[in-house]
Image (cartoon, rainbow, N blue to C red):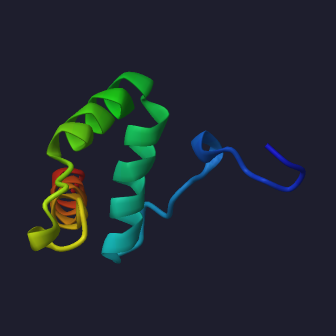
Amino acid sequence: MQLGEVDISAITFDAKSRDDIPRLLKALHYIWTNLELRNQVFQVLDTMTSTDKNKGRSGMEFWKMVLLKLSGSQG
Protein backbone atom coordinates (compact mmCIF):
# COMPACT_ATOMS: atom_id res chain seq x y z
CA MET A 1 0.00 0.00 0.00
CA GLN A 2 0.99 3.59 -0.54
CA LEU A 3 0.58 6.60 1.72
CA GLY A 4 -3.06 7.75 1.73
CA GLU A 5 -4.53 4.44 0.59
CA VAL A 6 -7.09 2.54 2.67
CA ASP A 7 -6.96 -1.23 3.03
CA ILE A 8 -10.04 -2.90 1.54
CA SER A 9 -10.74 -4.69 4.83
CA ALA A 10 -10.97 -1.28 6.59
CA ILE A 11 -13.70 0.11 4.32
CA THR A 12 -17.13 0.56 5.91
CA PHE A 13 -20.52 0.98 4.29
CA ASP A 14 -23.63 2.89 5.33
CA ALA A 15 -25.95 0.21 6.74
CA LYS A 16 -28.92 2.61 6.60
CA SER A 17 -28.58 3.36 2.90
CA ARG A 18 -31.62 2.43 0.83
CA ASP A 19 -29.52 2.28 -2.33
CA ASP A 20 -28.51 -1.11 -3.79
CA ILE A 21 -24.89 -0.11 -4.48
CA PRO A 22 -23.70 -0.32 -0.85
CA ARG A 23 -25.24 -3.82 -0.60
CA LEU A 24 -23.41 -4.88 -3.74
CA LEU A 25 -20.14 -3.37 -2.52
CA LYS A 26 -20.59 -5.06 0.85
CA ALA A 27 -20.97 -8.43 -0.89
CA LEU A 28 -17.85 -7.85 -2.99
CA HIS A 29 -16.05 -6.64 0.14
CA TYR A 30 -16.99 -9.85 1.96
CA ILE A 31 -15.70 -12.01 -0.91
CA TRP A 32 -12.44 -10.05 -1.14
CA THR A 33 -11.69 -10.19 2.59
CA ASN A 34 -12.47 -13.92 2.89
CA LEU A 35 -9.43 -15.53 1.25
CA GLU A 36 -10.91 -19.03 0.98
CA LEU A 37 -14.14 -17.74 -0.58
CA ARG A 38 -12.23 -15.37 -2.89
CA ASN A 39 -10.11 -18.26 -4.20
CA GLN A 40 -13.26 -20.35 -4.77
CA VAL A 41 -14.93 -17.52 -6.69
CA PHE A 42 -11.83 -17.00 -8.84
CA GLN A 43 -11.65 -20.74 -9.58
CA VAL A 44 -15.28 -20.74 -10.72
CA LEU A 45 -14.72 -17.64 -12.85
CA ASP A 46 -11.64 -19.24 -14.43
CA THR A 47 -13.67 -22.30 -15.47
CA MET A 48 -16.41 -20.10 -16.95
CA THR A 49 -14.14 -17.92 -19.08
CA SER A 50 -15.16 -18.11 -22.72
CA THR A 51 -12.78 -17.65 -25.61
CA ASP A 52 -15.44 -18.02 -28.32
CA LYS A 53 -15.29 -14.81 -30.37
CA ASN A 54 -18.93 -15.29 -31.47
CA LYS A 55 -20.14 -14.76 -27.89
CA GLY A 56 -18.95 -11.17 -27.51
CA ARG A 57 -16.52 -9.95 -24.88
CA SER A 58 -15.03 -12.85 -22.98
CA GLY A 59 -16.56 -13.33 -19.54
CA MET A 60 -18.81 -10.28 -19.55
CA GLU A 61 -22.17 -12.02 -19.17
CA PHE A 62 -21.26 -14.40 -16.34
CA TRP A 63 -19.64 -11.52 -14.40
CA LYS A 64 -22.94 -9.62 -14.57
CA MET A 65 -24.71 -12.73 -13.25
CA VAL A 66 -22.22 -13.09 -10.39
CA LEU A 67 -22.77 -9.46 -9.36
CA LEU A 68 -26.54 -9.80 -9.55
CA LYS A 69 -26.47 -13.01 -7.52
CA LEU A 70 -24.23 -11.41 -4.88
CA SER A 71 -26.41 -8.33 -4.60
CA GLY A 72 -29.53 -10.47 -4.12
CA SER A 73 -28.03 -12.86 -1.58
CA GLN A 74 -26.81 -10.19 0.85
CA GLY A 75 -30.17 -8.55 1.45
Residue lying at 37% horizontally and 71% vertically, measured from the top left: 21
Residue lying at 27% horizontally and 32% vertically, measured from the top left: 43
In the image, residue 54 lies at what x, y percent?
9, 72
Q: Is residue 49 above or below residue 71?
A: above
In the image, residue 2 lies at what x, y percent?
85, 48
In the image, residue 3 lies at what x, y percent?
90, 51
Where, quadrant-wise, is the N terminus in this rendering? Answer: top right
Work out which residue is located at the far right of the displayed protein and give it.
Answer: 3
Q: Nearer the viewer, residue 55 or 34?
A: 55
Where, quadrant-wise, is the C terminus in this rendering? Answer: bottom left
User: Left or right: 39 with respect to 51?
Assistant: right
User: Left or right: 63 with respect to 3?
Assistant: left
Task: Give the number of callouts.
Answer: 0
Work out which residue is located at the far top of the displayed protein and give it.
Answer: 36
Work out which residue is located at the far left of the displayed protein and give it.
Answer: 54
In the image, residue 18 lies at what x, y percent?
34, 76
User: Left or right: 22 with respect to 71?
Assistant: right
Work out which residue is located at the far front of the displayed protein and give it.
Answer: 53
Residue lying at 24% horizontally and 51% vertically, measured from the top left: 74
In the figure, residue 61 lies in which quadrant? bottom left
Q: Nearer the viewer, residue 64 or 70?
A: 64
Residue lying at 57% horizontally and 53% vertically, measured from the top left: 12
Q: Is residue 23 above or below residue 57?
A: above
